[in-house]
């Protein structure tokens, strides 16, 4: 029976080219300097897997997957921090001056009432959207198709916009 060290060395001997090619495929020229470090992280991940006592049943596919996910993870860490996009106005009409003149507490009350008057699915979709979820995440979350989620979000937002504009007048 081979020791973990021998098993690890065998994996390195037999699959070093696979690790190298997978890492270089993800790194390309822009992140090529990171390739040796990423390869080392892949080897550390393989060693940890063997140390945990878990067997690697299909080494080629497992090592390839580990190499790709490790490379992507390291590259994401080295990406420059994206600046938040500038706030954009929605496609709908701008809030009325009467609405903007209301106190924030009154604006929140109007929003809460408008959300409460929506059908249940539209209300859930709009509330989740306002909390930061996109339509694809909502589709997975609620078991809807992406087009249904998008439709409920936009239909609900339009209704909320109309109700809040009418109330503020």
Image (tube, helix red, strand yellow):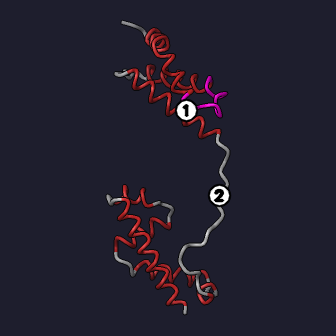
Q: Which numbered dot is residue 84?
A: 2
**Mark found first going from the N terminus, 1 or 2:** 1
> How far apart are the alpha carbons under marks 1 and 2?
26 Å
Judge whether residue 23 is colored magenta.
Answer: no
Say which of 1 and 86 sits in front.
86
Q: Which numbered dot is residue 54?
A: none
Q: Could you tell me which residue is drawn at 50 percent across and 90 percent down? A: 167
Q: Secondary structure at mark 2?
A: loop
Image quadrant where one finds the C terminus: bottom right
Q: Residue furthest front?
A: 29
Find residue 33 and report its horizontal and vertical position in percent. 67, 27
The kind of secondary structure the magenta stretch mainly shows is helix
Find residue 137 and report its horizontal and vertical position in percent. 42, 56
Residue under label 1: 26
Q: Residue furthest bottom?
A: 169
Between disc 1 and disc 2, the foreground one is 1
The reply, left or right, for residue 26 in relation to residue 154 is right
Q: Is residue 146 above or below residue 153?
A: above
Find residue 92 and report its horizontal and vertical position in percent. 53, 77
Q: Could you tell me which residue is drawn at 55 percent across and 32 percent down? A: 26
Q: Secondary structure at mark 1?
A: helix
**Picture quadrant where residue 39 is located:** top right
**Picture quadrant where residue 28 is located:** top right
Q: Give, as a single range, the part of the protein colored magenta.
A: 25-36
Contact? badges 1 and 2 (CB < 8 Å): no
Total numbered labels placed on residues in the image: 2
Say which of 41 and 136 sits in front.
136
């Amino acid at each position: 029976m081979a020791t973990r060290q021998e098993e690890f060395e065998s994996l390195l001997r037999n699959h070093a080219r696979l690790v190298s090619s997978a890492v270089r495929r993800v790194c390309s020229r822009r992140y090529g300097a990171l390739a040796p470090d990423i390869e080392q992280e892949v080897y550390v991940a393989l060693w940890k897997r063997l140390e945990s006592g878990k067997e690697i049943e299909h080494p080629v596919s497992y090592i390839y997957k580990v190499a790709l996910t490790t490379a992507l993870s390291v590259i994401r860490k080295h990406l420059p921090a994206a600046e938040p996009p500038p706030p954009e106005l929605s496609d709908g009409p701008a809030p009325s001056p009467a609405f903007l003149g209301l106190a924030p507490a009154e604006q929140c009350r109007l929003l809460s009432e408008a959300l409460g008057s929506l059908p249940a699915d539209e209300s859930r979709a709009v509330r989740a959207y306002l909390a930061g979820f996109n339509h694809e995440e909502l589709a997975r979350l609620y078991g809807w198709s992406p087009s249904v989620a998008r439709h409920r979000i936009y239909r609900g937002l339009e209704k909320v916009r109309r109700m809040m504009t009418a109330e503020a007048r």
